[in-house]
Image (cartoon, rainbow, N blue to C red):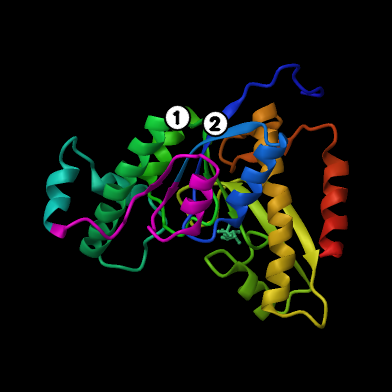
Amino acid sequence: MADKPENPKRLRIAVLASGGGTNLQAMIDRLAAGSLLVDISVVLSDRPDARALVRARDAGIPAICIDYNSFPVAEITETLSNPPIDLHEIDRKQRIIEDASADRRLFRLARLVLAERKLIAAIEKHGADYVVFAGFMRLVTPYFIGHFNSAGALKVINIHPALLPSFPGTRGYEDTFGYGGKWGGITVHFVDEGEDTGPIIAQAVYPIFPADNEESIKARGLSLEYEVYPQVINWLARGYVNILRSPGKRPRVEISDPEYADILRTWIRKAFES
Ligand code: GRF
C-alpha cells in the first residue's frame, strides 16, 4: 500500500495502564489536538489508585478498575466453570509462568483468567478495535490474547522501555543502564504468549552519555515513547501496519507509510534533544 487511504476508518482503542499514565496522557493530548486518528473508548487499570484512571476521567473517557486482588479464593473454581474455561489448555499455551509447580501454575492462571474475564467484558462493552497496553503491569494469559487475536489477527499492542529482544521484563531502563549500554531504546510490539516476545512494530533509540543515570535515560526514553506510541496507533488507523507471515517463521511487521524514513529521522533528532 503506497498511498494513504482517502478516508481512513476511525478506530477505537482500549488503553490498559497500571500506573502514572503518562503515555495515556500523550495520547489524550494528541486526541485533543486532533492528531490521534483513533478514539479511546475506555481506560482500564488493575489498580484503583492508578493516576491513569484520573487522567482518563479528566478527559471524559470511561475509566474502570478491575482489582486483581479482590477475588475470594473460594469463588475461583465456581466462577471459572460458568462458562467453563480449560485451564490446562491455557497452561499448555502460556509461556509466562514457568517456574512453579503445575498446581501453583494453574492457581495463578485461574486468578489471572478471572480478572481477564472482567477486563474483556469491560472492553467489549465499550468496543475496541485494538487493546493498547501502556504501562499495564500484569501478565496476560493466552485466554486474554486469544480472545482478541481470533482468526490470526493481532490486536493487542504493548510499549516496552528497552530495545527488544534485549532487556525484557519490567525494568527496561534500569537494565539498559546497568548493563552499560551506550544506546538505549524503546519498542512497540504485538503481544503474544510470551513476555515481551511478540512481533516488533516500531523501535526508536536514544544515546546514553557518560553523565547519564537511570533517571536521565528514563526521561529521554519516555519522551520518545510519547512520540512513537501515538505514531504506531496512527499507522494502525491508516492501515500501514502489514503483518508478513511465512510458514514456520515468526510473523514480521512491515510499515508501509511513505514517510517512514522521515519519521525515523525525526525520532533520532528528538532523542538528542532531551
Ligand atoms: C513506560 O516506560 C512503558 O514503556 C512501560 O511502562 C511505563 C509506563 O509509564 N511499559 P506511564 O504509566 O505511561 O507513565
Residue name at image x 86 percent, y 64 percent: 272
Residue 103 position within the rendered picture, expressed as x and y whole percent measured from the top left: 20, 62
Which quadrant of the view contains residue 84? top left
Q: Which mark is residue 93?
A: none
Residue at image point 81% right, 83% down: 211
Q: Is residue 69 magenta?
A: yes
- Circle 1: element type: loop
Identify the image quadrant of residue 85: top left
Q: Earlier in the sequence, mark 2 or mark 1?
A: 2
Mark 1, residues whose alpha carbon is within 10 Å: few (<14), some, or many (≥20)?
Answer: some
Residue 232 in the image: above or below residue 105: above
Ligand 1, seen in the image, is in the quarter at bottom right
Q: Quadrant of the C terminus?
A: bottom right
Q: Position of residue 270 (x, y in %)?
A: 84, 57
Q: Position of residue 153 (x, y in %)?
A: 52, 31
The percent position of residue 263, horizontal first and vertical second, equals 83, 44
Seen at 33% across and 36% down, the residue is 121
Q: Which residues are magenta?
A: 44-73
Please report contact status of discs 2 and 1: CB closer than 8 Å, yes or no: yes
Q: Quadrant of the N terminus?
A: top right
Return the residue at label 1: 127
Can I make out residue 177 in this image?
Answer: yes
The kind of residue on which mark 2 rests is Arg
Q: Is residue 191 visible?
A: no
> Mark 2 Cα within 10 Å, few/some/many (few <14, many 20+)?
some
Disc 2 target residue? 12
152 to 143, vertically: above or below: above
Q: Is residue 87 left or right of residue 129?
A: left
For numbered disc 2, what is the local secondary structure? strand
* Front residue of this view, candidates 273 and 204: 273
Please tell me which residue lies in front, 270 or 264. Answer: 270
**Ligand 1 within 8 Å, label 1 CB:** no
